[in-house]
Amino acid sequence: MATYYVDSNATGLNDGSSWTDAWTSLGSSLSVAAGDTVLVSSSHSETVSSNTYYDYTNATSALPVKVISANSTTGLYEKATSIQIDHGTVNFYDIVFEKNAEFHGLYIRANDLHFNGEGSMVLMNDCTFTFCQSPLLNVGDNATGVGICKFTNCLFDFSGGVGHYESYVSRATIADFINCSFVKYSASYLFDQGSPAPLADYYTPVTFKCCDLSVYDTIYSGVSLQTNGRKVVLERCKTKAGFSVFASIGSQSYDGLVYESSDSISLSSRVLGLVRKESYAGVVSSSTSVYRSSGSSDGDNDFSWSAESTASCGSINLLDSIEICKSAESGSQTITVYLAGSASLNNDDFWIEVESPSEEVSPTAQSKFRTTKPDPLATPTALTSDTSSTWNGTGVGTKQKIEVAISPTIAGTVTVRCYLAKPSTTVYVDPKISTTGNQRVFNGVLVDGDAAPSGGGGATVHPLRSN
């Protein structure tokens, strides 16, 4: 796996081999091999023609191409300050990103932006998208198979529009928006479900986690849910009063709406108990034969979650856990997740995302988002060794833990998601989160530490409740 370079200011051989000889256009990098890294100078700028495709055809889900904004002097990750991939001001020109690629820290200015999974995955992280003229955002257009488009820590700015506005998710695409913000043009909705019915006859689950959606009245402007149904999930998002997902449901079917701890929206129920979750990346299931002493218990059995990845698992095709939740009081505290396996894992093999109650002086329902995943140019390091836990069962020779400090200004729910990106690996996770620093007492017994409360409510509490 090789590293290549892009910098519009380079004056060398234009072969991508170094910062001096960097390609002057990102389009020159499209033939790199699976697993290669393309570093783009944070001061890079280029204007592209209409219908420009960033299609890394050699990439695979296990070995995606990584396109990363970097400081051309230090070589370290640096979110673009002046980088632009701009297709000008003429209406209805497209910039399309697709095919098993990760893009980190880019600044994109366009009229029409398309993100096509087409049976694969596209990850946009820490990117800014500004729209001009007739803004159009299309996630999944022309996809020929189920694709995944994931946006994390991204800003979508439609405020520069002066004409037609349309934005939708379509064509069998799974779309995730995590910790994203939106600046609207003029429409009161985010996605258009009117003519030409972009959601018709295609299963389209969309999830918003920890997003600021407060500029919109509704997510979908019309109803084109058709027969296959839709699933829309909002988790801990900031919304305005009177907000709704659909302008109207009518007689159309849909698979489900889940509102969890979002402003102006009621809390949905959570299903508890033993779990099994299968995906192309592997299987997450409950294990009663491998577990941590004084860890998770359903009242009858001690258990852990076994995360067993396939050979296709990788940095885009992640194996992610069921969410782990618990209540937390306000104040500084540390969240700890314990795990065990047959070998030591690095922080790019296994990491967690933590969403905790707001840390703002005037708190909102938009939670604080943190990830322990290293930045794309950091040297991976081993997870912290866990020298205090006792694990039972086979295959747990290496014990590790991940700690994250939080400082919520209001009590609420802490949610942890675990991600495994190492192929053909089995990891056991204790879904009982340890909280130290700011702990509660119930009937004179510690609640938020490793001891379970007793008296009144019984000797144990389910680990997904307030243990």
Image (cartoon, helix red, strand yellow):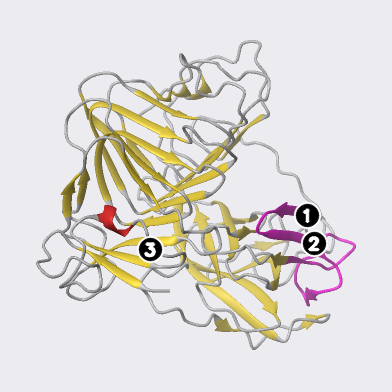
Q: What SS does tag 3 mark?
A: loop
Asked if marks 2 and 1 touch (Cβ < 8 Å), the reply is yes
Q: Residue drawn 68% across and 71% down?
A: 424
- Percent x, y for residue 316? 52, 58
Q: Position of residue 51 (x, y in %)?
A: 30, 36
Q: Which residue lies furthest to the top in this view?
A: 251
Residue 168 sits in quarter: top left
Along the polypeptide, which appears first: circle 3 or circle 1? 3
Q: Mark 3 points at which residue?
A: 32
Instruction: Give the label, 3 or 2, closer to the camera.
Output: 3
Disc 2 crowd, CA 10 A, few/some/many (<14, 14-19, 20+):
many
Residue situated in front as seen by the camera: 88 or 236: 88
Q: As drawn, is 164 to the left or to the right of 380?
A: left
> Residue 372 location, x and y as percent?
47, 68
- At 21% from the left and 68% from the top, the residue drawn is 71
Q: Distance between the residues labelled 3 and 1?
A: 37 Å
- Residue type at mark 3 is Val
Magenta includes 413? Answer: no
Percent of width and height locating residue 50: 25, 35
Residue type at mark 1: give it: Arg
Splitting the image into 4 quarters, where does residue 299 fall?
A: bottom right
Write down the residue under mark 2. Answer: 286
Magenta span of residues: 277-306
The answer to whether any part of residue 85 appears in the image is yes
In this view, which residue lies farthest toward the right? 300
Gap in Å between the C-alphas at discs 2 and 1? 7 Å
Of mark 2 and mark 1, the one earlier in the sequence is 1
* Magenta-drawn stretch contains 301: yes
Q: Is mark 1 on a helix, strand or loop?
A: strand
The amino acid on which the numbered mark 2 sits, given as a three-letter code, is Ser
